[in-house]
Image: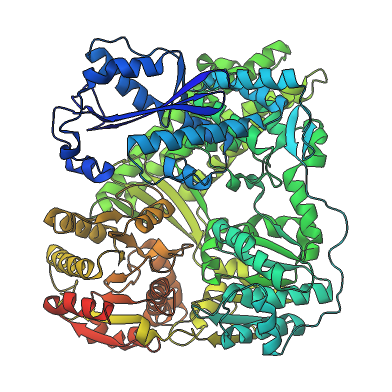
Amino acid sequence: MAQRYAVIDLETTGNSSKKGDRVIQFAGVAIEDGIIVEEFSTFIRPGQDIPVFIEELTGITNEMVKDAPEFQEVASRIVEFLRDSCFVAHNVLFDLSFLQDELIRCGFEGFYGSAIDTVELAKITKPTSDGYKLNQLAKQENLQHDRPHRADSDAYVTALLFLELNKKLAALPLITLKKLHKLSFSLKSDISDLLEELMSEKTAKNEVRCPDLNIFRGIALRKSIHEDGNHHVGISHSYPFDHAKKAALMQTAILHMEYRQQQFKMMDLVYESFHEGRHTIIEAGTGIGKSLGYLVPAAFFAKHHGKTVLISTHTIQLQNQLIHQEIPKLKVMLPFDIHTVLLKGRGNYLSLAKFERALREKDDNYETALAKMQILVWLTETETGDKDELNLTSGGKLFWERIQSGGYIDPELLQPWSSVDYYERATRLAQKADFIITNHAYLASGFLEDERMKPVEGFVILDEAQYLEQAASKYLGSRLDYISVKTLLNRLGTYEQKLLLYKLEKLVRENKLKGLKSITILNEALNNVIYDLDHLFYLLAGIAEKHLSGEGTGRMAIQVKEKPEWRQVTTLVNRMNNQLHYFIKELVERLDALKQKDSLGKNPRFFIGEFEMKVEQLREIELLLKEFFIDPTQSFIYTMSYVKSAPHHGLSLSSQPITAGAALWGTFVASQNSVVMTSAILSAKNSFQFFKTQLGIEDMDIKTRCLPSPFDYSNCVKGLIASDMPDINAVPLDEFVKGAARHIISATKAAHGRVVIIFDSDNILRKTYQYVKDLGELEEFTMLAQGITGGSKLRMLRNFQSFEKALLFGKTSLWEGIEIPRDNLSCLVFVGLPFSPPDEPATEAKCLLIAKQGKNPFLEYLLPEAIFRVRQGFDQLVRSRHGKGVLLLLDPRISTAGYGKEFMEAIPGLKWEEVSLHTLERKIEEWSYL
């Protein structure tokens, strides 16, 4: 590192020097030849009060800077420190631009040397990092960071981080560095200079190739997993039916292991189910140790009988939890080796053939160039090619859609990469594995359709089985939204825009193809489709706004045949589809004619493959529009979701079978030798009937068992019922909202944060959140609200966990696929019993179907579903034997309605008490300190 690097950090009174904000602390760390050679830091008197927020964030007070020099007094020292240096900072754009403005304001020349952003550098060198904040990266690199948001500490840690990231770059092979260098000119900081220096050093030293890497067609790849041998080998180790033997096994992997009788019972149930070839439903209460409860017996069965056991769970996150946390424990305790393969949908894997072609393209925007650089580095690390290892930007995720496995690609272009193809390797390994770990979404779609996986079917564990119906709905249903359709049409572009359609026409002309329609006619058809698309979604938004009451978002049924206002929509869809059909037909004729040309090179053939994928997407749109508005299927529900803040841009159409679970899983379960379905919550009203009906397995011979939690709920959770909450059906909505808000404020103060509030109505959620916020009594708390404060559900929950004093307003779907770690939730509030709104399209359709069968929809569906949701929330509240939590119900119906007793009895051992708003705070405090 011959270059001198000046690593800088500033603390300021705000974000903009131009708006009068000033520096309150400057810190710099100089690096020469890879060593820290100089440090300089100083407080700076800003000439204005430091805002309270900045004081709390940095710990820098007005008292601390009152005798410090002003900026102009230290400016010359700063200029000297920066001389002949490359400016380095974490989020360099902020520090550099702010410092430039301050230097110029004080009559000095600004800094005009090269600059490197350690955020950008970290994204490239650490493409699998969970996050790129300084504190996150410092933790990952084991760098001590005692005083975050103080310039001296931040600058020093950034300097150490920069040195670590530079080492990672230096460890890359020369061939990867060259490709990175070529792409680096699209970046925002001058990382190209750093790469150039490293390339020169490697060339001079005559680089020794890393034994863990293969250079394949000019791309450095991590060597693949060894694939020899068949892991289906019978073993002499018998399953340990004796509980003492189970305990001895588990003690080898788990320190201070608790003897859990129910966990051992679960192990026996799973083993017997597989051995006897029968189906079993097991409700394994919180704290049993469910994962090992099925993994241990499944391992013994797989090895002893030479079978593959398929394990499916709800989400990719839970898949990863099994692979990275539970399977390693299992391997330590077993007296034999177990081979596990993680298998996901094809689109989760990188197509190296497509990526190779994408690297040759030169029209990179910033996010595409960054994604390519991240992937090049990642390929030297990954053995799976699984995108979930990567942390891509939103633009990077769009780029991934172009390079993911699947879709059409010319076999001749694919063939050179077949030996190292990630998806093909995963399926080969799966065929030899003892365990295949997958997720419900892939099981519902790709896995069942892949003939190569048929031999491994037969013995199955479905964990988090309550989400199987949801997975079936997504697979069997469809979705269409304005943004995705418009994005596809924009990517094609008219001929004048010189995008994909232009490139196709250029190929047609270069190959002198005859007998095709004029490009002018294609242009006109595309423009007509775009015009009709805009008109259609504006029309749909008008219908939605007219029919959906309340604020924010809503969902309504598409009723083309029942309502006259839909006739205009039908006419428009017919016209749009005619234009779309014609446009597709003309594109296909061009593509087919080009494919007949033997003289086409590799690049044109690759382009044709990509374009054919776009044509398939257009065909799908044509079919969906027809299904939604012209020829709907009787057994499906068709709905329209509307966002008032983005009337047509935020509008989406979706479909799902009325009985999605029964349409898929009944057939699946019947076709297997043995299926074990498990979760912490599968029963309602002391019965599995609700769950079995959802999956269409109510008439099958299935063994069922409830294994209660080892926790004493009466000592873990206090159940409180607000006795003075108004009935939502008996008072104006605003009065109900005010009552809910007052109870939420009292509960939050008493619990000192970590409060989650669940709503079954978007409208009530929004109104309550706003009312609590406007009252201003919880200003010391961080308030998060699903669908309001922004970000994904997962991101919002991470934010919730990172603040000691936080409250989260969420919908009934909040828990789906999410587990809040123990001690991160103190109080759970249900604002109203969580019944599905009867006028919600899917609920209405299911209730009508149940009524047609001569049954009571409330007793058969609405009530058990609501009880199920309360139990699901309660499960999040109870995470340890010694925790203390509060479950608060803001609904008088639990005490007054005949069915209220069923909610109270749904959680055995939980003691309920009625409280008024006046006594609520005291009751929670008394319970918390018991």
Above or below residue 201? Residue 841 is below
Residue 66 % position (x, y): 15, 33
Above or below residue 141? Residue 817 is below
Q: Quadrant of residue 567?
A: top left
Residue 829 % position (x, y): 28, 70
Q: Please tell me which residue lies in front, 615 or 397.
A: 397
Is any part of residue 696 visible from this angle?
Answer: no
Q: Please tell me which residue lies in front, 284 or 9.
A: 9
Q: Please tell me which residue lies in front, 561 or 733.
A: 733
What residue lies at 57% left-to-right and 23% top-to-bottom?
33
The colour mode here is rainbow
Above or below residue 668? Residue 491 is above
Where the C terminus falls, by quadrant?
bottom left
What residue lies at 48% left-to-right and 22% top-to-bottom?
5
Residue 160 % position (x, y): 50, 35
| Left or right: residue 31 compared with residue 512 | left
| Left or right: residue 209 compared with residue 374 | right
Q: Please tell me which residue lies in front, 856 or 86.
A: 86
| Left or right: residue 671 compared with residue 190 | right
Q: Quadrant of residue 61?
A: top left
Q: Quadrant of residue 349?
A: top right
Above or below residue 745? Residue 625 is above
Q: How many marks?
A: 0
Residue 798 % position (x, y): 41, 54
Is any part of residue 788 visible from this angle?
Answer: yes
Where the N terminus falls, by quadrant?
top right
